[in-house]
């Protein structure tokens, strides 16, 4: 089956999550992605784990293996003059460069877009940084927690009377990788028309605004309304919440009155419970959600706590009520539906027991997305790239290794 990005050559000079996740998405579409790492230490994610039996190993990090499947891997120190010269040779035949250097560092190394386009006018340069290529914060480093806070996301996550929280598991980094991969596709389409490369400036902090805080920002701009943290619920027509049941939690969202009525009839064994029908406080569902949500939670609690998630889920599906169980990771990995759809892909690598991870993010009917090769060990493809692609001899490669350039 044909691959969407067959023939597209990508250099990945980025580490941890945002840039590598972008590269993985492109690799799944058939792009030839060559990952460039610092000699000896490699990508930061190699040290983050999780590791088999909790024993750290450069080539056995679960995070690294997930993010870097289907890529070739080489080592190169671009901060050394010879390393930069080799890097420029690699760029001459590349279509895309994904990099995460801070603007000041890129300029000092002469690896900013103004210099790179002289080497390859058709090159698409994707710069992923915490705060973008312009503005007073452009040269600041940051973690996901910083980008979430400064991008406005943290202020709306958490309990109303407690401190703001950051979304878990580097969510913003993954979202930035998705945005970058999409931007590259558009830039490749544009290049087909004008035959010129371009610079894509992608900010991790701004990724939050695109994905999550857009409506929050617009509400403030147009009406001055500031959204605060709402904990386990959203202030909307009741219910828009997560509530405990006998063996876990249930996600309960019924935006239509008919859905809510059908659930109440489940609770009341065929009719709306008297405690709800006779209480004037609940006639206006929006007002009930804003002022009496705690009261409704407590009234529903005895019924919820006497039923399991599956029991409630089965009855809700039968009655067309869109409530779902909140599953833990063990339940997600063993979900019949997801496994029937082959949502998970098994990763195999030497000396590590095969394990599951999310597979194709989208199914193409005529061009497949697949990741068949495991992530490269540190410097695994140095021979292929330096000797076969660039024409270095064995002696030259040894010299480069001894001098710490590769």
Image (cartoon, rainbow, N blue to C red):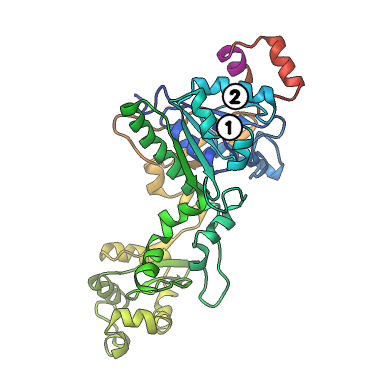
Residue in the foreground of this view, choosing between 176 and 97: 97
Secondary structure under the numbered disc 2 in the rendered image:
helix
Q: On the rendered image, what quadrant is the N terminus found in?
A: top left
Please give the range of residues in magenta: 384-390
| Displayed quadrant of residue 388 | top right
How many marks do you count on the picture? 2
Residue 283 spot, x, y in % from top left: 27, 85
* Tag nearer the camera, 1 or 2: 1
State the SS at label 1.
Answer: loop
Task: Report the residue that reaches farthest toward the right.
Answer: 402
Residue to which mark 1 is pinned: 111
The residue that appears at 50% across and 66% down in the rendered structure is: 157
Task: Indicate the position of residue 234 as horizontal and vertical percent values.
Answer: 40, 71
Q: From the viewer's perspective, is residue 70 above or below residue 275?
A: above
Q: Which residue is mark 2?
A: 87
x and y percentages locating residue 272 in the rendered image: 26, 81
């Amino acid at each position: 089956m044909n691959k969407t990005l067959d023939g597209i050559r990508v250099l990945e000079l980025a580490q941890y999550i945002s840039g590598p996740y972008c590269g993985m998405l492109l690799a799944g579409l058939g792009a030839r992605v060559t990952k460039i790492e610092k000699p000896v230490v490699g990508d930061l994610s190699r040290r983050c784990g999780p590791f088999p039996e909790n024993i750290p190993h450069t080539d056995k990090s679960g995070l690294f293996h997930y993010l870097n499947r289907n890529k070739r891997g080489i080592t190169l120190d671009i901060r050394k003059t010879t390393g930069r010269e080799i890097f420029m040779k690699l760029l001459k035949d590349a279509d895309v460069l994904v990099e995460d250097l801070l603007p000041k560092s890129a300029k000092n190394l002469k690896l900013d877009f103004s210099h790179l386009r002289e080497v390859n006018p058709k090159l698409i340069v994707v710069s992923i940084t915490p705060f973008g290529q312009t503005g007073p914060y452009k040269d600041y480093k940051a973690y996901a927690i910083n980008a979430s806070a400064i991008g406005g996301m943290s202020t709306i996550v958490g309990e109303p009377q407690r401190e703001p929280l950051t979304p878990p598991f580097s969510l913003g980094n993954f979202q930035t990788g998705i945005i970058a991969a999409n931007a590259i596709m558009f830039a490749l389409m544009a290049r087909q028309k004008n035959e010129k490369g371009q610079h894509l400036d992608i900010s991790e902090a701004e990724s939050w605004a695109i994905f999550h805080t857009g409506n929050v920002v617009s509400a403030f701009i147009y009406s001055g309304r500031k959204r605060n943290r709402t904990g386990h619920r959203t202030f909307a027509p009741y219910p828009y919440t997560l509530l405990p049941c006998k063996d876990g939690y249930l996600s309960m969202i019924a935006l239509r009155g008919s859905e809510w009525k059908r659930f109440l009839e489940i609770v009341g064994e065929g009719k709306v419970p008297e405690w709800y029908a006779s209480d004037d406080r609940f006639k206006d569902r929006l007002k009930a959600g804003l002022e009496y949500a705690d009261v409704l939670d407590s009234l529903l609690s005895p019924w919820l706590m006497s039923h399991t998630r599956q029991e409630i889920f089965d009855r809700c599906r039968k009655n067309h009520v869109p409530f779902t169980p909140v599953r833990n990771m063990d339940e997600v990995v063993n979900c019949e539906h997801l496994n029937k759809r082959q949502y998970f892909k098994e990763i195999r690598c030497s000396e590590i027991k095969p394990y599951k991870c999310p597979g194709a993010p989208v199914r193409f009917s005529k061009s497949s997305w697949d990741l068949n090769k495991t992530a490269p060990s540190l410097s695994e493809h140095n021979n292929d790239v330096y000797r076969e692609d660039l024409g270095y001899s064995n002696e030259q490669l040894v010299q480069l290794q001894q001098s710490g350039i590769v």
